[in-house]
Image (cartoon, rainbow, N blue to C red):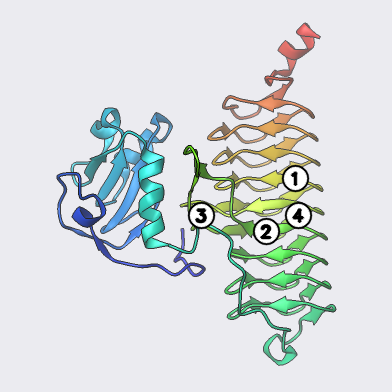
Amino acid sequence: MSKNIFFERKGPFKLNILFPDQSVSNISIKDIKTLDNAGKFDLTFFDSLNYKNLAEKTKASCCVTKESLKRYLPKTCEAISAKSVLFEIAKITTKFYPFADIDYPDNSLLKPKKSKFPGVKFGNNVLIGKNVKIGKSSTIGSNTIIEHNVLIGKNCTIGSQIMIKNSIIGDNVVIQDGSKIGLKGFGFIPIRGKNFRIPHIGKTILEDNVEIGASCTIDRGSIGDTIIGKNTFLDNQVHMAHNVKVGENCMIAGQVGFAGSSTLGNNVSIGGQAGISGHLKIGNNVKIGGGSGVVKDIPDDTIVMGYPAVPLKEFLKKS
């Protein structure tokens, strides 16, 4: 995860100030990051055995976790027990990033000056935020909004009525009309009377040669990033939730929905209207039939179909 260029960060904060009800050190905490990206003076979180391997190797100074998971953390990482890990990390993230809980309007939007974007073609009524960079030979369609600090590579085709924020986009990327890239995901802690919104401080990364179909929604990451790998193509009306990571050369048909934090390998094909549950690992060269519901990890080189999705031979026997 690269440096956060999209959200203003407060702090640093002393750990004992962040957690006044716990017996913790007074080390200064500079940021909040995922287990694999955290370093010295960073706070991280660990709430599932699915991430045990990452927890054992984390370089974070401290980690919010469950009492039962403390033993998997390195001795160099100070463990902070919590009944609800996500609630605790959401509250602390709000202190560091107080403006990441809602997608507030970008007040820096202006019509682009062609002198700032040599070799870029703009349609009518385009608005660009401050510090946006767009590579040569790219085209931006009418009524499209590109918010502050977004980076777009060379030879990209960005259609009409598109919203792009909190995103880094590679070269030769195509985004079809009506898509929304880098928006806040559907993350909150249910509380009676008033739900607590989880700030989303990650970004969306579209690597080289990616194509996004019309009216797709790609949420940015919550703490980490949402990433779509090189040469992956999405059909129309695909929804991808926060922290999803898609490999290279994947093909995803229309109306597929991804819940948060699932990971896809390379060369994955998914048929239309399939649903992928959260925190799953889909291997390389996997094929998922249309209308399937994936609720478990899928190993490499597997074809599945059905709801819940099962290996194709098993599905055909039951049909």
- Decide: is 62 above or below 108: above
Callout 4: few (<14), some (14-19), or many (20+) C-alpha neighbours within 10 Å? many
State the separation of the CA atoms marked 2 and 4. 10 Å
Q: Residue at x 36, y 39 (%)?
A: 85
- Decide: is 2 above or below 264: below
Callout 1: few (<14), some (14-19), or many (20+) C-alpha neighbours within 10 Å? many
- Callout in the foreground (4, 1): 1
Q: Mark 3 vs mark 4: which is more N-terminal?
A: 3
Disc 2 marks which amino acid?
Answer: Ile
- The percent coordinates of residue 41 (x first, y second) are 26, 59
Residue named by callout 2 = 181
Q: Secondary structure at mark 4?
A: strand
Q: Mark 4 vs mark 1: which is more N-terminal?
A: 4
Q: Is residue 105 left or right of residue 178?
A: left
Contact (CB < 8 A) between labels 4 and 1?
A: yes
Q: Residue at x 79, y 29 (%)?
A: 290
Q: Mark 1 vs mark 2: which is more N-terminal?
A: 2
- The percent coordinates of residue 99 (x first, y second) are 48, 64
- Callout in the foreground (3, 1): 3
Q: Secondary structure at mark 3?
A: loop
Contact (CB < 8 A) between labels 3 and 1?
A: no
- The percent coordinates of residue 15 (x first, y second) are 22, 55
Disc 1 marks which amino acid?
Answer: Val
